[in-house]
Image (cartoon, helix red, strand yellow):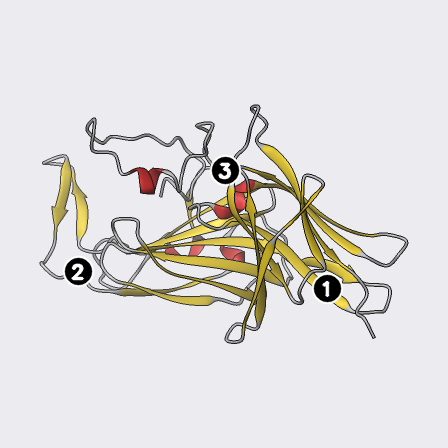
């Protein structure tokens, strides 16, 4: 929940027992965190469900980012707070797996319509990432997720932007953010798309932090730039989800400047 809400992030580990691989998914090199802009709140569809004892419901929590939002799904079945002992009491030795559907509309306050890009990551109880995927969908369409006991999944929700190149080719693009962080989209401060006089379409994201920055695209970009310098990028097409992904490495921030511009350019298709 700390990676999917706008509240404070604290560490209660004993000295010398910190899991730094886990903390690096929460904290940037300058000590700041990619927190949501609003407190983590339960989604409407789980408000009146017993997510700890009914044996079938997942806890879903949402927050907003500067460009989109995030939804966390958690399997917390099998334990509940006891006011008498002031602690968690376990119920049964084998808590069940749960199934839920995650939708962009789970993030209250986001505009309707679409399309939207959803980047999901599935985590084990120790924070190890089991799987990750990118999909496009409408605001009320959903992605199915099944969670075993104590597992979680975090979803970054981003609106798709884009436009036409001078030769009429449609470009769809959306900045997903730092894909190795829990709140990937928290790294994106602003996002815009513009076309110059030569017909080249440029998608620009103002980003914070360092590490692997991911874009959703429907076609390969001509180039990728980081703070005015052309950068190497990796492009991959996922035939199952019919989505393209661009990954570019943002270098370690120096001089206390944590923000930089990340630009994908799309030129006219060669004949």
Give the distance between the C-alpha atoms of the residues marked 3 and 2, in whole angstroms. 31 Å
Query: What is the x, y in percent for residue 229?
Result: 69, 42
Q: Residue at x 82, y 57 (%)?
A: 200
- Residue 50, can we see it? no
* Camera-side mark, 1 or 2: 1
Residue that carries the numbered disc 3 in the rendered image: 38
Quick one: 26 or 199, which is closer to the camera?
Answer: 199
| Residue contact between numbered discs 1 and 3, judged by CB atoms under 8 Å | no
Residue that carries the numbered disc 2 in the rendered image: 95
Please indicate whether residue 18 sits to the left or right of residue 89 in the image: right
Please indicate whether residue 197 sits to the left or right of residue 249 in the image: right
10 Å crowding of disc 3: few (<14), some (14-19), many (20+): some
Tell me the quadrant of the picture where the N terminus can be found.
top left
Give the distance between the C-alpha atoms of the residues marked 1 and 2, in whole angstroms. 45 Å
Please indicate whether residue 111 sits to the left or right of residue 131 in the image: right
Query: What is the x, y in percent for residue 205?
Result: 66, 45
Q: Residue at x 65, y 67 (%)?
A: 218
10 Å crowding of disc 1: few (<14), some (14-19), many (20+): some
Residue that carries the numbered disc 1 in the rendered image: 171
Where, by quadrant of the figure, is residue 162 drawn? bottom right
């Amino acid at each position: 929940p700390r990676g999917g809400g706008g509240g404070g992030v604290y560490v209660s580990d004993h000295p010398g027992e910190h899991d730094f691989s886990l903390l690096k998914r929460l904290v940037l090199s300058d000590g700041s965190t990619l927190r949501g802009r609003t407190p983590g709140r339960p989604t409407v569809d789980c408000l009146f469900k017993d997510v700890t004892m009914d044996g079938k419901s997942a806890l879903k929590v949402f927050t907003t980012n500067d460009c989109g939002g995030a939804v966390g799904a958690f399997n917390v079945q099998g334990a509940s707070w006891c006011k008498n002992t002031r602690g968690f009491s376990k119920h049964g030795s084998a808590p069940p797996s749960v199934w839920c559907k995650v939708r962009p509309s789970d993030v209250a306050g986001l505009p309707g319509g679409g399309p939207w890009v959803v980047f999901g990551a599935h985590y084990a109880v120790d924070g190890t990432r089991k799987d990750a995927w990118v999909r496009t969908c409408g605001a009320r369409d959903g992605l199915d997720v099944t969670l075993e006991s104590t597992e979680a999944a975090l979803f970054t929700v981003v609106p798709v932007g884009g436009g036409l190149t001078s030769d009429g080719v449609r470009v769809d693009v959306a900045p997903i953010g730092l894909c190795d962080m829990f709140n990937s989209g928290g790294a994106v401060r602003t996002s815009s798309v513009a076309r110059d006089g030569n017909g080249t379409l440029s998608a620009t994201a103002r980003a914070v932090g360092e590490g692997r920055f991911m874009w959703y695209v429907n076609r390969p970009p001509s180039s990728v730039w980081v703070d005015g310098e052309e950068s190497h990028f990796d492009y991959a097409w996922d035939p199952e989800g019919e989505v393209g992904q661009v990954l570019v490495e943002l270098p370690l921030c120096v001089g206390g400047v944590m923000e930089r511009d990340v630009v994908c350019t799309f030129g006219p298709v060669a004949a």
